Image (cartoon, helix red, strand yellow):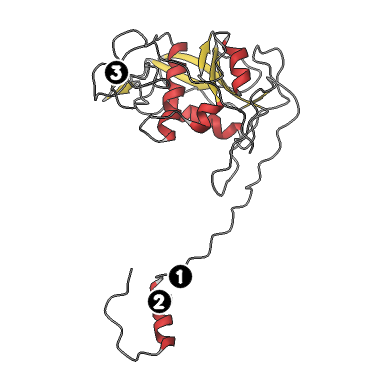
Amino acid sequence: MATKGSARRGRPVTALLMAAWLSGCGIPAAAPPSPAGSTATPAPAGSDRADGSAQPVGPVAGTPARSGPAPVGYPADGTNRWQVAAGEPAAPRGTGRLLRYRVAVERDIRGLPVAEFAAEVSATLTAPQGWTTGGALRLWRVGPGGPADFTVHLATPGTRDELCGDAADGYTSCRNGDRVVINVARWVKGVPGYGADLAVYRRYVVNHEVGHRLGHGHERCPGRGRPAPVMQQQTLGLHGCTANASPYRDGRRYSGPPGAYADRVPPPEPGRRA
């Protein structure tokens, strides 16, 4: 942007440079220093199998400060060993049905601290228009060692196939019993043709798979140009609807006709290095 007014002919070069410096135009600002604590603390040794047969030494607490998005890396096939996030200090108030859940990130996934992923999951589940809208349901994130009604796993594509127990596609996410499995490849890359930013897709996939754990089946697009129900398989296609991450809209449960589409599942991608 030019400074207000015009420079007089013959104005000294030094004065022009000084004016430009004062106005901040055309001179790049120095990058701010990285915040303290930007290096994540290594996770403690130990493992937590998906079936709960072993637990990590301790929860990973606190979200480390970061100066910007870090690349997330993962192999195509992980080792089914887990970091489990710390729990929230107290159950949410209210009289609605209380479900406890854990959040776990496979140890082979690099660049995404378990506390950061857990914070996104919890914010999604308890957001306005989320599953706790209306107060009939309360969701409480608990740490390792205590009872939980289900676990949200962020898994590599190969481990996704192990945990889901369905057709091994390496591409989608799933719910299998008390396992809610988010494929890290979808978390990092989203899906083509979604028509919304990655943050919207991430909220959608968490709400969709947790919705299955809450007893909801698949739904179809209610009409071209309308928001897709959160229980529609938006990962595989919108079918004329627009992307939507929320199970409630305007304070009311938003749904479509029951059923699913015969969409082709894309092939899995290779792992991604950080």
**Three-letter amino acid code at the position of disc 2:** Ala
- Label 1, secondary structure: give it: loop
Left-right relation of 251 to 237: left
What residue sits 34% from the left and 12% below the top?
Answer: 219
Q: Is 124 rendered above or below residue 100?
A: below
Left-right relation of 25 to 43: left
Which of the two discs, 3 and 1, sits closer to the camera?
A: 1
Label placed on residue 20: 2
Choose between 127 and 260: the one closer to the eye: 260
Spatial separation of the CA atoms under disc 2 and disc 1 = 8 Å
Residue beneath label 1, please? 27
**Where the C terminus falls, by quadrant?**
top right
**Where the N terminus falls, by quadrant?**
bottom left
**Three-letter amino acid code at the position of disc 1:** Ile
Task: Identify the mark nearer the N-term, 3 or 2.
Answer: 2
Residue beneath label 3, please? 254
Which of the two discs, 3 and 2, sits closer to the camera?
A: 2
Q: Tell me if label 3 and label 2 are in contact, CB under 8 Å.
A: no
